[in-house]
């Protein structure tokens, strides 16, 4: 008797879970499918005329640089955060989390407050002959700022999960810390690194608010694809839709590459 | 409900206070409002920032005769300590911010620069364009770039120049560009809305708008592109 009741409950829960999953799936899929369905072929031509390629090129180059910066600077940060357990490390962790919850426009204002002409470091930058706002460098800085948490935090968790004894054993066998890091730690954390990089890169690719405030909107210099889309929306929606589809396809390709098994096994294998 | 261009937000809030009846005002970019009305939004009165948004084939049949309400001058704004004192000196500014040509304020800016080229030569316009560092999506963003100290000069509406801590420089007569705001009641509108539209066009209503930087339209059509 009890067993039948239990089995009944399991069945109910399972169907509820299915319905819930289906609902969320519909919520995500419906807008994207609708967007694709409303696309007309002529819109793509109009989008090209409105500088689709220029904006896409800028988006690809700037986010590639931003991703490289994330890997080069974010990996050591994730590693040191994982290896220390001081109160300061927790405070820094919180700090790294902040860009993920900051509204993008606020991030833009904050970046101006730091690096703008009237900003805290505006004078020092001016002495070096550097003017960041309205430059491609500003676009990249905004992208790194908003994408950093998505790369650093999962990677930090992955580093922390690595068995310390294994690292000590390697050291005791005479491997240098550098060698241990590149031969053991990094390959073990590679799946998290790649998935974090994919999400961080995608976040940089979609970056809009902070870029608009900090970098502005000039085709070829600061007008990334999301900004070109928003600008195009001021006129006819068609070209904006076409650009949006292109952006989604690019993001999808990015995920396919960064999350592909061959890449993970190639990078994950210790050399 | 009154659907009005974003530049009218403050002025209409005050107008609503002066007017005796009940009034709801929804402000946004003119093109956004236009799309909403086309899609059947419950608007009674429509006041976009350009006749183009009231006279397009897709919306004109929904409106009851758009008529001229008021105009808004395009003006140059600079930081208060700026060495620039005339529109012609704009060619000496290092960082200029304009609206994107996709929005009216950017379209009007292009008209003003074209007229500047007619007055001071194509080289003048080239020098200005060479220093344009950004073409923002709306007039608030354009203005913000000057108030935040990032831009040396920008072209915005007179109604916006009033609220910010910047110096306003009027464009000379032969260059002057005005945005013309039409007003129209939407077919099948609530009688209250129609009465408000009529009141806003009266001396009492216009006075509120003039208090907020809007102006009577000058003779002739000064730049509805």
Image (cartoon, rainbow, N blue to C red):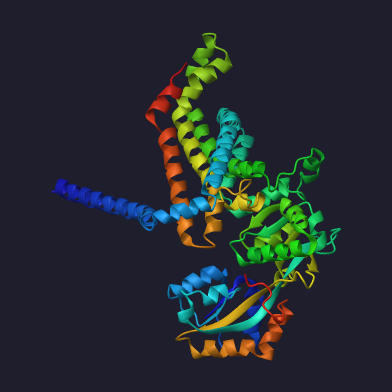
Residue A266 sits above or below residue A201 on the image: above
The residue closer to the viewer here, B103 or A94, is B103
Residue at x 60%, y 64% (from the top left corner): B103
Where is residue B164 drawn, in percent x and y? 75, 66
Q: Which picture quadrant has residue B195? A: bottom right
Q: Which picture quadrant has residue B46? A: bottom right
> Image check: A119 left or right of B60?
right
> Image check: A199 left or right of B200?
left
Residue at x 85%, y 59% (from the top left corner): B81
User: Is residue A56 among the parts visible in the rendering?
Assistant: yes
The residue closer to the viewer here, A129 or B51, is B51
User: Is residue B164 among the parts visible in the rendering?
Assistant: no
Residue at x 80%, y 41% (from the top left corner): A124
- Which residue of the protein is positioned furthest toward the left in this rendering? A1
Where is residue B155 drawn, in percent x and y? 72, 63
Where is residue A179 drawn, in percent x and y? 55, 15
Where is residue A249 drawn, in percent x and y? 42, 44
> Image check: A189 left or right of A124?
left
The residue closer to the viewer here, A123 or A182, is A123
Residue B41 sits above or below residue B20 on the image: above
Residue B123 sits above or below residue A252 on the image: below
Residue at x 74%, y 51% (from the top left corner): B131
- Which residue of the protein is positioned furthest toward the top in this rendering? A174
> Image check: A197 left or right of A21?
right
């Amino acid at each position: 008797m009890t067993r039948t009741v239990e089995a009944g409950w399991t069945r109910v829960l399972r169907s509820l879970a299915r319905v819930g999953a289906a609902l969320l799936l519909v919520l995500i899929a419906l807008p994207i499918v609708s967007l694709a369905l409303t696309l007309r072929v002529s819109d793509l031509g109009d989008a090209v005329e409105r500088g689709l390629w220029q904006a896409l090129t800028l988006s690809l180059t700037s986010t590639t640089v931003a991703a490289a910066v994330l890997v080069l600077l974010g990996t050591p940060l994730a590693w040191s955060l994982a290896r220390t357990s001081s109160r300061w490390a927790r405070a820094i962790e919180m700090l790294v989390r902040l860009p993920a919850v900051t509204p993008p426009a606020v991030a833009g204002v904050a970046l101006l407050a730091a690096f703008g002409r009237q900003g805290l470091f505006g004078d020092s930058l001016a002495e070096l002959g550097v003017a960041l706002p309205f430059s491609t460098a500003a676009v990249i800085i905004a992208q790194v700022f908003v994408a950093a948490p998505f790369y650093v935090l999962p990677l930090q968790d992955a580093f922390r999960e690595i068995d310390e004894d294994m690292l000590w054993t390697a050291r005791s066998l005479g491997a240098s810390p550098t060698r241990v890091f590149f031969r053991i730690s990094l390959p073990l954390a590679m799946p998290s690194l790649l998935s974090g990089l994919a999400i961080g890169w995608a976040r940089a690719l979609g970056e809009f608010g902070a870029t608009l405030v900090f970098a502005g909107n000039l085709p070829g210099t600061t007008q990334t694809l999301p900004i070109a889309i928003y600008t195009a929306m001021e006129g006819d929606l068609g070209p904006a839709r076409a650009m949006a589809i292109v952006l989604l396809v690019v993001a999808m390709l990015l995920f396919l590459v960064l999350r592909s098994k061959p890449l993970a096994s190639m990078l994950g294998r210790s050399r | 409900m009154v659907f009005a261009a974003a530049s009218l937000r403050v002025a209409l809030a005050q107008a609503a206070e002066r007017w005796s009846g009940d009034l709801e005002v929804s402000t946004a970019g003119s093109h956004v409002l236009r799309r909403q009305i086309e899609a059947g939004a419950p608007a009674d009165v429509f006041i976009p920032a350009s006749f183009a948004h009231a006279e397009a084939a897709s919306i004109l049949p929904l409106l009851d005769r758009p008529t001229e309400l008021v105009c808004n001058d395009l003006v140059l704004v600079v930081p208060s300590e700026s060495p620039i004192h005339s529109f012609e000196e704009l060619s000496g500014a290092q960082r200029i911010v304009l609206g994107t040509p996709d929005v009216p304020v950017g379209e009007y800016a292009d008209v003003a620069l074209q007229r500047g080229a007619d007055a001071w030569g194509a080289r003048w316009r080239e020098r200005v364009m060479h220093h344009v560092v950004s073409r923002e999506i709306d007039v608030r963003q354009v203005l913000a770039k000057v108030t935040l100290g990032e831009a040396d000069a920008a072209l915005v509406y007179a109604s916006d120049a009033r609220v910010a801590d910047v110096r306003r420089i009027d464009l000379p007569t032969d260059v002057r560009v005005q945005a013309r705001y039409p007003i129209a009641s939407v077919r099948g509108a609530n009688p209250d809305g129609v009465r408000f539209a009529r009141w806003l066009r009266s001396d009492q209503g216009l006075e509120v708008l003039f208090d907020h930087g809007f102006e009577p339209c000058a003779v002739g059509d000064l730049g509805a592109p």
